[in-house]
Amino acid sequence: MASGGLGTVRTRRRRPMIVGLGGTTQPNSLTQWLLAGALGAMAQAGAETLLFGSGELDLPMYAPERPERGPGALRLLAAVEQCDALVLATTAHHGRVSGLVSNALDYLDDLHGAPRPYLDGRPVGLIVTAPNAHSAGTAMTALRSTVHSLRGWPTPQGITLDTSASPTIADADGRLTDQTTANALETLVDQIMGFTYAWSQVI
């Protein structure tokens, strides 16, 4: 901490580390593309980022009674334990979070004894894609509830994308052309970065 004329001032910590988790098993999925875009914007804002896409989340079914963990699960757990914030992105299946993402979140139960258990005190941005608005909204509500139960702070801005109604949201160069989605993504990034830097001043 530094001392100044207005009293004690806390110095900013290291660059925040933000983990992105999600995607689908389909190559070049829109869900993972949005997740990567959010992380890219956070990197431009000064964060270190780490993406766990569908390949990294191809983990055995979580079984708490079997304590052995493979290298992929250990890498995920280490990253989440050390991170300052997360972004979760899932496609909705019948109004539910995908099995890929749900299983990865189940692994976070292993962090119950960590200094910051589960997602304690960390902002979590949420992205949900679905073939209809109702399914996207239902999955978003479920994902928010899961983050709360893991002691995380879902950002006020979440992104739900109805893929059946949405126009092409990116051009041939991969730039967002759908302004509603672009605005929502910018707000989500601002909220995570703002919360992360504010929280770093008090812990």
Image (spheres, rainbow, N blue to C red):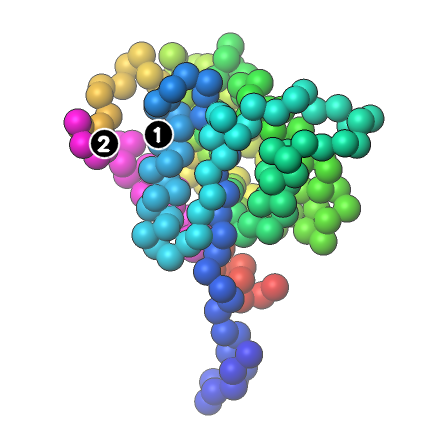
From this view, report whether residue 136 is shown above or below residue 107.
above
Q: Main secondary structure of the magenta part?
A: helix
Say left or right for 179 vs 126.
left
Q: Residues within 10 Å of mark 1 (few under 14, many from 20)?
A: some
Q: Which residues are magenta?
A: 172-195
Q: Which residue is mark 1?
A: 33
x and y percent of residue 136 in the render? 44, 19
Say left or right for 32 vs 88.
left
Mark 2 residue type: Gly
Q: Quadrant of residue 147?
A: top right
Mark sitting earlier along the chain (1/2) = 1
From this view, report whether residue 34 is shown above or below residue 45.
above
- Quarter occupied by the N terminus: bottom right
| Residue 147 on the magenta segment | no
The structure residue drawn at horizontal position 75% and vertical position 24%, both measured from the top left corner, is 63
Q: Give the farthest residue toward the left.
A: 172
Q: Which residue is mark 2?
A: 174
Q: Quadrant of residue 194?
A: bottom left
Q: CA distance from mark 1 to mark 2?
A: 9 Å
